[in-house]
Amino acid sequence: MGSTTAANGNLHMLFFPYMAQGHMLPMVDIAKLFAARGVYVSIVTTPANATLIRPTIHRSNFPITLHLLTFPSAAVGLPEGCENRSSLPSDSHRSSFYRGIAMLRQPFDDLLKQIRPDCVVTDMFMPWTYHVATDRGIPRLVFDGTGFLPRCADDALQRHRTLDNLPPDASSFTHPGLPHRIDMLLSQTHEHSKRPPGLAASFDAINSQRKEVDPKSYGVLVNSFYELEPKYVEYYRKVVGRKAWHIGPVSLCNQDVADKSLRGGDHESLDGDRCLKWLDEQKPGSVVYVCFGSATVFAGEQIREIAMGLEAAGHSFILVAGRSAKEEWFPEGFEERINGEGKGMLIRGWAQQLMILNHAAVGGFVTHCGWNSLLEGISAGLPMVTWPLFADQFYNEKLLVQVLEVGVAVGEKGDGEWGGGGWEEAEGEVMGSGEEADGRRRRARDLGEKARRAVEMDGSSYDNIGNLIRELLERKAKLNAA
Ligand code: UDP
């Protein structure tokens, strides 16, 4: 019971994503998934972010309404139209960005008063939404964009006060009580990550509010699927003890090429046709795709090292270098050479990641291990080179390399030193032949199939969406009867 439950328009859910691609794109996918099950859906965002998601919403043909709140850019000293984490001029502007988001509190409350949804799903970076919703008697679900292993590891760290109890000269530790032995360097933890002083204060403030309100929220929506990390789903239920619904991989709701290529891009600068044409000319499984997500800002020497390594290695490649990459960072004549030889493609802006990962020509993914990229690589059935840089990415690497055995680590230590030395070797292992590489590819393909089954009718994630809808409908019926 519950798995195929549809809301038939009797339930209104409101989604308010944090304005960063890694949070906004999956939340829009989640909104589409609920809309597909008959839920009336509202999405709240700001005008500049609406431009990014409107094409996706229009294509979906579901009853989804966009509500726009004006972002107070000028009031917090940000340039006009700077309303997304990825469009901030630099990392030091993040505190202003958080302040701007917190200023949306009153307009958000006004909106809730006006449209009165049955439940809200809001991001962990906006803990104040819990109070606004609760004061209006509306249950709040949290979305934080990550999976079960990272949240269990984080919980274990806090619960056992592991870091407080280490000897002063310790540089590494083992997470206590987890289903697998997970060793980490101190330099890879949130607590030891290097942040500008102003940003550290904003982060700490948000974190302490989260600690207070997330456990009191109705539950958590998790972009994961049971078969990916069953022991961590169970651990979360039994040890952490919070309600969580695994409903992913949510990106799989983007089925055709147009859905995949429209997702989240700056639609005017898309170079998708050229990319698709080039991929069509490559042999199956021969291309390595290199991308570090939507938020990584590289130094010139890092891009240079990667570009040189890719050129030297034997495989065709797509390198996503980001908009800020400067011409002089690349080896001389790099782009003309790789274009001329047909050896690779350089993408300077937004890459159509879903379309690329799911193309038959792609055989490996060099990833920064953002949770979305991890799941998208898994869903595409690809082995990965893991190159985590910050936040939960170090945990995500453990899942890929140690638990699932579909990744090879480059050995990034998270200490601020560029640990790229081992990456060419890792790339060779993932793209190479032999028993180990074949085993990794087989395991990755199997996981890709499991991911697809999880979101099909009667799959574990499909069922869980039905379970949540049923629970929310029952809650509403009780309230109406009271
Ligand atoms: N993405 C994309 N094109 C890009 C960069 C990122 O489509 O050029 C998408 C990617 O598919 C993923 C999201 O943006 O869905 C990034 O999320 P992730 O958690 O991987 O990393 P983050 O950007 O949060 O570090």
Image: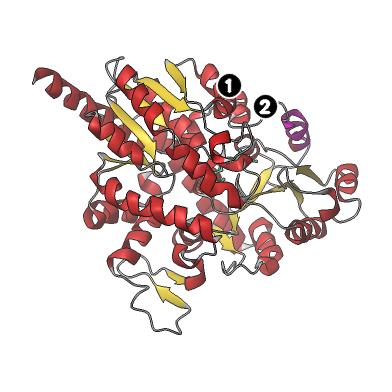
Colouring rule applied to residues: secondary structure
- Which residue corresponds to the image point at 46% horizontal and 60% vertical from the top-left? 395
Q: According to the image, label 2 marks what residue?
A: 267
Compared to residue 175, the image places residue 226 above or below, namely above
- Which residue corresponds to the image point at 49% horizontal and 15% vertical from the top-left? 61
| Residue 79 lies in quadrant | top right
Furthest toward the front, the residue is 75
Q: Main secondary structure of the magenta part?
A: helix
User: Mark 2 or 1 closer to N-term?
Assistant: 1
Asked whether the viewer can see residue 246, the reply is: no
Magenta stretch bounds: 270-278
- Residue 11 drawn at (x, y percent): 28, 20
Instruction: Give the quarter of the figure containing the C terminus.
Output: top left
- Which residue corresponds to the image point at 65% horizontal and 68% vertical from the top-left? 419
- Within the magenta stretch, is there residue 337? no
| 2 and 1 marks in contact (CB < 8 Å) | yes
Q: Ligand 1 appears in which quadrant? A: top right
Q: Is mark 2 within 8 Å of ligand 1?
A: no
Counting the numbered discs, the total is 2
| Residue 232 lies in quadrant | bottom left
Compared to residue 234, the image places residue 118 above or below, namely above
Asked whether the viewer can see residue 335, the reply is: yes
- Residue 471 drawn at (x, y percent): 21, 30
Compared to residue 331, the image places residue 165 above or below, namely below
- Which residue corresponds to the image point at 71% horizontal and 39% vertical from the top-left? 349
